[in-house]
Image (cartoon, grey):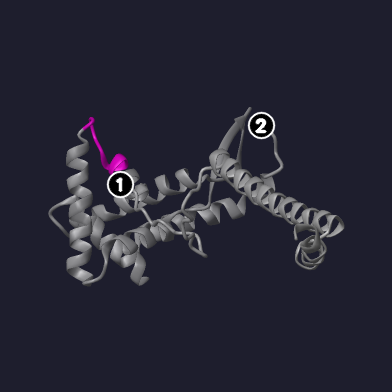
Amino acid sequence: MLPSILPSLRLTARRWLPTTTTTTTTARAFAAAAASRDQATLDLAMDELGQARAMMQTPSVPSIPRPTTPTIMDIPPAEDPLLYYVTSHLMRHGHRARASRIVSNILLHIHAWTRAPPLPILRQAVLDAAPAVRTVSHRSGGKTTFKPTALSEKKRMYYALKHIKDASRARPGRSIEERMAREMINIVEGVASEAVKMKRKMHEFATVNRGNIQTRF
């Protein structure tokens, strides 16, 4: 009975079981799919490794928003340079504290009489009384030659304060700060001022001797 069943079993096996060629093709397809998956996995792993190395080499710094326009820091000086120079000009025998009190009282008197910020008035008065040139004399034998010379900024301030202080002696007042405050207010208002007259005399004398500018002493 068994030999008679063998042909039927062989026919059934051929129908339901894959052949050798089919098995080989299927195995190759599975291998190719596995290889492609392995390559994709390897590429993903390499990308992640590269990102990790980049993060280790360049630490991530949080981005700070930067202003579009530069920040301007308006820091005022500890002391106004002009007030410092006025204090030094009025100082006598090293008593700087007394000279500082005089300058403070000058500003106080200017504010009391004008009801305006005193520092711009003081600054404008000094600029209006500051000459631009002075005349240097040179004596050679029996002849005296006068040569106009331009003044530096510091020398201009020196002559301006000297003229204001000398002109304030004719002003009414019990203290030097009160007299100097009156003189500065008159200079800014355009009233007749001796300090301005001294400045004009220096300029006129330099203009008369302008022909000696090229003279060498």
Instruction: Identify residue for label 2.
Output: 217
Q: Nearer the viewer, residue 169 or 36?
A: 36
* Residue 137 seen from this side: yes
Residue under the point 34% across and 44% down: 85
In the rendered image, residue 192, in percent from the top left (x then y), is placed at 35, 67
Q: Amino acid at mark 2?
A: Phe
Could you say which disc has been placed on residue 161 in the image? Answer: none
Q: Is 98 left, or right, of 84 in this rendering?
A: left
For label 2, the crowd category at 10 Å Cα-Cα, with few meaning under 14, some 14 to 19 and many 20 or more, is: few
| Disc on the earlier residue, 1 or 2 | 1
Q: Is 5 left, or right, of 156 in this rendering?
A: right
Count the marks: 2
For this orientation, the residue located farthest to the right is 21
Q: Is 149 left, or right, of 183 in this rendering?
A: right
Q: Secondary structure at mark 1?
A: loop
Q: Secondary structure at mark 2?
A: loop
Q: Quadrant of residue 197?
A: bottom left
Could you say which disc has been placed on residue 78 in the image? Answer: 1
Asked if the stretch drawn in magenta spans residue 92, the answer is yes
Residue under the point 80% across and 58% down: 3
In the rendered image, residue 196, in percent from the top left (x then y), is placed at 41, 60
Which region shows up in magenta?
Answer: 86-94
Q: Nearer the viewer, residue 74 or 17?
A: 17
Q: Amino acid at mark 1?
A: Ala
In the rendered image, residue 76, in percent from the top left (x then y), is placed at 34, 53
Q: Is 130 left, or right, of 133 in this rendering?
A: left
* Residue 192 seen from this side: no
Quadrant position of the N terminus in the picture = bottom right
For label 1, the crowd category at 10 Å Cα-Cα, with few meaning under 14, some 14 to 19 and many 20 or more, is: few
Q: Quadrant of residue 112?
A: bottom left
Residue under the point 50% across and 48% down: 60
Q: Nearer the viewer, residue 211 or 78?
A: 78
